[in-house]
Amino acid sequence: MSNNMADVTIHIDETINAEARERIQDELRGMSGVMAASSHEEKPHLVVVEYDPERINSHRLLDTVTASGVHAQLIGL
């Protein structure tokens, strides 16, 4: 693993419950190159992902989120 680390915030358009958010976060955490994925109850539409940009890119992270059936965008790039 490289010493590089980046983070990106993904905005989920739909209102989803904590269980659905946790499933998305678990899917992200299971990806090679992802160190962490988290959200908070105060801002349930936002998921912050920490990852190694040499192993995975932000668009692949977004594709994983939208594959779960929600609409989402990358923010803070």
Image (cartoon, helix red, strand yellow):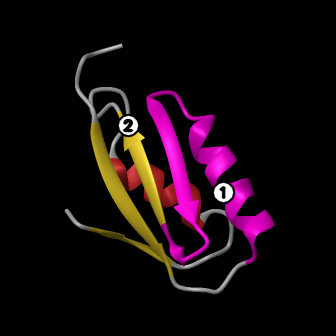
Which labelled disc corresponds to residue 51? 2
Residue range of the region highlighted in magenta in the rendering? 17-46
Q: Which residue is mark 1?
A: 24
Q: Position of residue 65 (x, y in %)?
A: 56, 61
| Residue 16 sits above or below residue 61 on the image | below
| Residue 52 sits above or below residue 58 on the image | above
- Judging depth in this view, the residue of 33 and 19 nearest the camera is 19
Q: Amino acid at mark 2?
A: Tyr
Single out the residue that lies furthest toward the front: 42
Q: Position of residue 52 (x, y in %)?
A: 33, 31
Q: Gap between marks 1 and 2, in whole Å?
A: 15 Å
In the image, taking residue 46 as reference, residue 4 lies left or right, namely left
**Residue lying at 68% horizontally and 64% vertically, measured from the top left:** 21
Q: Amino acid at mark 1?
A: Ile
**Residue lying at 68% horizontally and 73% vertically, measured from the top left:** 69
Please say whether residue 22 is one of the residues in the magenta stretch.
yes
Task: Mark 2: give few (<14), some (14-19) or many (20+) Cα within 10 Å.
Answer: many
Task: Mark 1: give few (<14), some (14-19) or many (20+) Cα within 10 Å.
Answer: many
Quadrant in which the N terminus appears: top left
**Disc 1 element:** helix
Marked residue nearer the N-terminal end (1 or 2): 1
